[in-house]
Amino acid sequence: MMSNVTLRVNGATHTLDIDPSTRLLYVLRNDLGLRGPRFGCGLGQCGACTVIIDGVAMRSCVTTASRVSGEITTLEGLARDGTLDPVQQAWIDEQVPQCGFCQNGQIMTAKALLDRNPNPTDAEIREAMDRALCRCMTYYRVQAAIRRVARGAPADAPANASTTVPQTAPSTITMPAAAPNTTPAAATGTSPTAARAIPEEVAK
Ligand code: FES
Ligand code: FES
């Protein structure tokens, strides 16, 4: 049976006529067109679908949409007025993504961590991130990016990489086929147009 469900997402209120048992991930992707959160396992185990609800990283694939009353933030909601969140920028500066599929979960989990603990220890980083799985083994660069945000390094002063995605880096997540290979979209959650100006794995 369908019913009206109201969700607050990235600062906007949406009332949707949906089956109230629908998982939040499907509402975000299919009804609201927010493709930052990814479907990985669908079982709450991999983290690809992570969103932030009232400051807490949550797995949207196992969250019932009608039970969410708080403010939902997706990858698309991190940037402000065209400026990437420091976490997204650090992902670019450290060249974190490989295939990019898991990176929404990595970024959103890291964002929630840094918002509640701006200067985490390495042990705290590992503990917070240990359930955000990456088959490409980007864990070391994930940790480096989180450290970069924690120490407040200037976004325009990459430690060991340029902000240009290497030509060999896959852009499977959100980069349109014709888009220049200059910015990861898995880290930003922007529209396809905006994603051309922002790295793909950081923007979605
Ligand atoms: S898709 Fe949600 S945890 Fe894997
Ligand atoms: S699964 Fe993490 S970058 Fe490929």
Image (tube, helix red, strand yellow):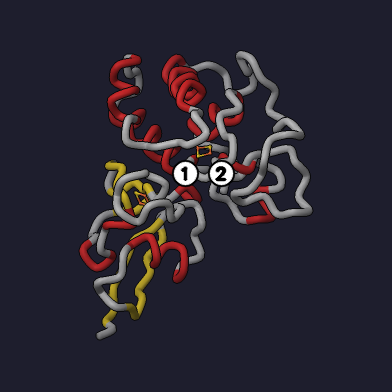
Q: What residue would you read off at disc 2?
A: 186
- Res 80 seen here: no
Residue at 34% over, 18% down: 119
> Dot 2, how many residues are within 10 Å of its Cα: few (below 14), some (14-19), or many (20+)?
many
Callouts 1 and 2 close, C-beta under 8 Å: yes
State which quadrant residue 127 falls in: top left
Residue at 52% over, 34% down: 136
Which residue in the rendered view is the most extreme toward the bottom? Answer: 1
Residue at 29% over, 78% down: 19
Horizontally, residue 119 falls left or right of residue 80, namely left
**Ligand 2 closer than 8 Å to label 2 CB:** yes
Query: Where residue 5 appears, x then y in whole percent?
Result: 28, 73
**Mark 1 or mark 2, which has the lower sequence index?**
1
Query: Where residue 61 appears, x then y in whole percent?
Result: 33, 57
**Ligand 2 closer than 8 Å to label 1 CB:** no
Q: CA distance from mark 1 to mark 2?
A: 6 Å
Helix or strand or loop: what does disc 1 sit on? helix
Question: How many numbered discs sit on the rendered protein?
Answer: 2
- Screen quadrant of the N terminus: bottom left
Viewer-nearest residue: 19 or 137? 137
Query: Where residue 4 appears, x then y in whole percent?
Result: 29, 79
Q: What residue would you read off at disc 1?
A: 104
Instruction: Say if 55 sits above or below 65 in the image.
Output: above
Q: Amino acid at mark 2?
A: Ala
Instruction: Say if 28 sits above or below 153 in the image.
Output: below
